[in-house]
Image: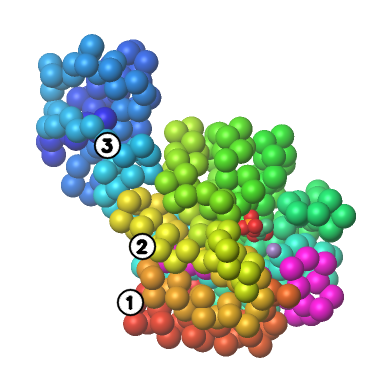
Amino acid sequence: MIIVFKPEATDKHIERVVERLKEIGMTPHLSRGVARTILGAIGDERLLEEHPLDAFEGIERIIPILKPYKLASREFKNDDTVVDVDGVKVGGETFTVMAGPCAVESEEQVLRIAHFLKERGVRIMRGGAFKPRTSPYAFQGLGLEGLKLLSKVRSETGLKIVTEVLDAQNADLVAQHVDILQIGARNMQNFELLKKCGRLRRPVLLKRGMSSTIQELFLAAEYILMEGNHDVILCERGIKTFETFTRNTLDISAVPIAKLESHLPIIVDPSHAAGFRAIIPALARTAVAAGADGIIVEVHYDPEKALCDGQQALRESDFDRLMDEVRRVAAVMGRTVQ
Ligand code: PEP
Ligand code: MN
């Protein structure tokens, strides 16, 4: 249910309703919009039928949320959410380019890539310390050592860092070292991990599972939102189809669908969708044109030597071209690139 307050409702009116919802066992989620305050009442809706709120002052309307996802829906919050990553805004007017290597390999590697990206105006760098690999024989990441290197990049360059958190047990540790917790495609329905990240006060980048529907992505986001963390960035990274030319098939419709259905920002990962570098700039341009709030791309100065996903890493010159093209499409879309 959504409880819409009258414009003149006071804090006391709102507080009374919040208290009542808690008493009857529902979870209140407050959203203060520009014009109005809205309260999401999440829980068994029959409780509200048994305990009507008619007598409470300040309430204008009570509307059921018809969608299975509640807090992630536009019904709950009409204004676009802009996620504040320690001063760097994701969503809204800007188009955010997150870039970096697939995996953290060494201090020299991450620092070199970080300085390269910073000079090009990038504000958020990616890099995996814990790598979820299809094969157990493939490079699994540097683990804690990798996190420490990312932390060093962060303090030396001021770049914000996004890295993957693989399990709930490690989430606190990862959160100590980086700015955005990435939940990877393979973990999109790891509900304990979703809930854990929901309890941590760090923005979350939630990637769509390769075999998950868009609705399942919204419901996964719902797990994080329900715990009180409202800083969720969705990510379309390609899904499994019968097509074998690409590693996955970029489902570009996910972008406008997310914009229609949800207030959360959505970015596109053209690297893991494509699986090879030649078509990544085209997918990135498509993402901007479709209305995405950003992209996350893999970059490496020496892809032949990369320990992970070298075939899809953009070389430095490719990245420069991509940025130039993305900027031009973004200008048409009325957005500035960071
Ligand atoms: C990644 O971004 O490092 C990654 C492993 O992506 P995905 O979870 O989308 O496969
Ligand atoms: Mn990768």
Q: Which residue is mark 3?
A: 66
Q: Nearer the viewer, mark 1 or mark 3?
A: 3
Question: Of label 2 and label 1, which has the lower sequence position?
Answer: 2
Label 3 neighbour load within 10 Å: few <14, some 14-19, many 20+: few
Question: Of label 3 and label 2, which has the lower sequence position?
Answer: 3
Can you tell which mark lies on residue 256?
2
Q: Nearer the viewer, mark 2 or mark 1?
A: 2
The stretch in magenta equals 292-310
Question: Of label 1 and label 3, which has the lower sequence position?
Answer: 3
Q: Quadrant of residue 291?
A: bottom left
Q: Please identify the quadrant where the N terminus is shown.
A: top left
Can you tell which mark lies on residue 334?
1
Ligand 1 placement by image quarter = bottom right
Q: Position of residue 94 (x, y in %)?
A: 41, 69
- CA distance for labels 2 and 1: 16 Å
Residue nearest the observer in this picture, 237 or 7: 237
Q: Amino acid at mark 2?
A: Pro
Label 2 neighbour load within 10 Å: few <14, some 14-19, many 20+: some
Q: Amino acid at mark 1?
A: Gly
Q: Quadrant of residue 257?
A: bottom left
